[in-house]
């Protein structure tokens, strides 16, 4: 039975590889004076990348069999027929990175790539809702396209095709489509620049909010600093907050990230103070909002877990360096929460947040509301390594060991699933509704 299943899996993966989009490298540099790298230099960098991954990656063939991944590497290497611009070579590498099935394995452009066109990024923030590409904001001070408009084309190309190409070549743990969906949504301007370079202009066609009326506009580009301020806001240790809904006897605790490596006392003090208030006011319902939380420091996640577990439980499956104590049962907090817990989840759940959610799910602590998460109970984030390719200086980032939550029998190929699915519609977005919170409050009322 197992051999038959393995054969079917191998055939399906091979079929998807052969049938899927192939990087043809038809995209040429947008400007005639752009730097191009010789065929020999690109071949050297490709072989360096392949050799580095094969010798050092924690689990290179965990989700794609070696034969399939080797075949893909050979195929992409064969596409190096002439000199290429940096973004053309980057595009050639992305199908390989994506097929590994590891969200902590990625390729980054060198900083010099962004420095040359620091003021020429796509300026619109987007949401992917109901197969629509919806404008959710602007990276420039001016509102160039009204929020709620539906993007149709960028520089003559259907935006849905652009999104599809990005999704097909973006890395995620266990090839998770929900993580990819949220990553493309959040990082669209940078993914666009990495794949297509920096065009002379951004001409967009869009439909006005809730209407079929189409308009065309040439956009003023955004600068690198403005885009990164929004895109990487979790790295700025956002302010933690809890809201009390007294009439519903409910607390809403918003944990956008666990990235408080340099501010762990700030995080733990916040958690302690929140549960002190919950205990003193005898709050019966806690909504733990983890949407957008793509991981961070276990030294933050573990104290939170101690307030939710019903008895001392181990956090990690094994002893992992400085986290070795977390392989032992975590002492339960004195004022641990014992009432009704609802956890809000989306596709950005990743890394440390994946471990955290896996433990809650495994031990049946609370109920999950939302969409499937972006992670499993395991990730390759140990001994993270960054290697610059010799000629192009593209940065190859990967983990050399794995972390796994202390669970048994969970499927590492499947995301953390919600107990109650929440579906946001385009109309919900236009109306400014938070259907996740609404669903949680409805369940509490029931």
Image (cartoon, rainbow, N blue to C red):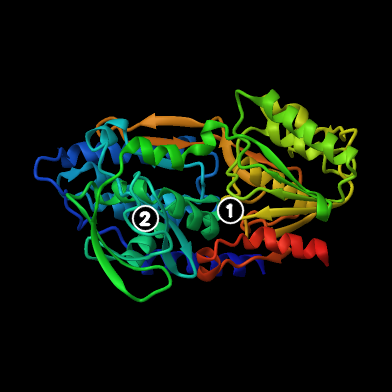
Quadrant into which the N terminus falls: bottom right
The x, y position of residue 15, in whole percent, is 43, 69
The x, y position of residue 313, in whole percent, is 84, 40
| Disc 1 versus disc 2: nearer the observer | 1
The x, y position of residue 347, in whole percent, is 57, 55
Secondary structure under tag 1 reads loop
Tell me which residue sits at (9%, 45%) in the image: 32
Separation of marks 1 and 2 at Cα, in angstroms:
25 Å
The furthest residue to the left: 32
Q: Give the left or right position of residue 48, taking residue 178 as reference.
A: left
Image height check: is 85 above or below 166? above
Give the residue number, with chain letter if any, for mark 2: 72
Image height check: is 273 above or below 214? above
Q: Give the left or right position of residue 334, taking residue 441 as reference.
A: right
Query: Marks 1 and 2: CB-CB under 8 Å?
Result: no
Quadrant into which the C terminus falls: bottom right
Secondary structure under tag 2 reads helix
Q: Nearer the viewer, residue 434 or 329?
A: 434
Q: Nearer the viewer, residue 431 or 29?
A: 431
Counting residues from the N terminus, which is met first, the one under dot 1 or under dot 2?
Answer: 2
Tell me which residue sits at (43%, 54%) in the image: 184
The crowd level at tag 2 (other Cα within 10 Å; few <14, some 14-19, many 20+) is: some
Q: Nearer the viewer, residue 387 or 430?
A: 430
Q: Give the left or right position of residue 176, taking residue 50 as reference.
A: right
Q: Give the left or right position of residue 406, taking residue 131 as reference.
A: right
For residue 267, which quarter of the picture? Answer: top right
Give the residue number, with chain letter if any, for mark 1: 374
């Amino acid at each position: 039975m197992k051999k038959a299943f393995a054969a079917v899996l191998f055939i399906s993966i091979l079929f998807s590889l052969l049938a899927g989009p192939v990087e043809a490298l038809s995209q040429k540099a947008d400007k005639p004076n752009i730097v191009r790298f010789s065929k020999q230099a690109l071949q050297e960098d490709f072989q360096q990348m392949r050799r580095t991954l094969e010798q050092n990656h924690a689990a290179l063939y965990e989700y794609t069999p070696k034969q399939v991944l080797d075949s893909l590497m050979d195929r992409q290497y064969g596409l190096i027929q002439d000199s290429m611009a940096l973004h053309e070579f980057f595009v050639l590498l992305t199908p390989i990175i994506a097929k590994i099935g590891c969200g902590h394995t990625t390729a980054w452009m060198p900083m010099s790539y962004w420095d040359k066109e620091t003021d020429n990024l796509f300026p619109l923030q987007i949401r992917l809702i109901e197969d629509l590409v919806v404008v959710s904001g602007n990276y420039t001070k001016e509102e160039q396209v009204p929020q709620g408009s539906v993007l149709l084309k960028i520089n003559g190309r259907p935006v849905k095709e652009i999104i599809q190409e990005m999704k097909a070549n973006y890395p995620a743990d266990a090839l998770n489509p929900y993580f990819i969906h949220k990553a493309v949504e959040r990082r669209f301007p940078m993914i666009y620049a990495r794949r297509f370079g920096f065009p002379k202009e951004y001409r967009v066609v869009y439909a006005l909010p809730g209407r079929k009326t189409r308009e065309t506009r040439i956009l003023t580009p955004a600068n690198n600093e403005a885009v990164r301020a929004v895109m990487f806001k979790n790295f700025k240790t956002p302010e933690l907050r809890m809201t009390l809904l007294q009439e519903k006897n409910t607390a809403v605790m918003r944990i956008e990230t666990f990235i408080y490596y340099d501010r762990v006392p700030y995080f733990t003090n916040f958690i302690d103070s929140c549960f002190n208030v919950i205990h003193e006011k005898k709050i019966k319902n806690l909504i733990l909002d983890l949407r957008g939380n793509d991981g961070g420091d276990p030294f933050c996640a573990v104290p939170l877990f101690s307030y939710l577990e019903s008895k001392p439980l181990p956090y990690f499956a094994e002893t992992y360096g400085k986290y070795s104590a977390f392989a032992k049962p975590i002492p339960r907090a004195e004022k641990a929460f014992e009432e009704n817990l609802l956890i809000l989840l989306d596709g950005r759940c990743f890394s440390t947040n994946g471990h955290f959610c896996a433990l809650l799910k495994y031990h049946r602590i609370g109920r999950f509301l939302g969409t499937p998460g972006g992670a499993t109970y395991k990730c390759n984030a140990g001994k993270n390594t960054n290697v610059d390719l010799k000629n192009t200086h593209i940065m190859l980032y990967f983990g050399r060991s794995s972390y796994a939550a202390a669970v048994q029998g969970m499927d590492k190929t499947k995301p953390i699933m919600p107990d109650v699915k929440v579906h946001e519609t385009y109309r919900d977005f236009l109306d400014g509704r938070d259907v996740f919170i609404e669903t949680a409050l409805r369940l509490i009322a029931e």
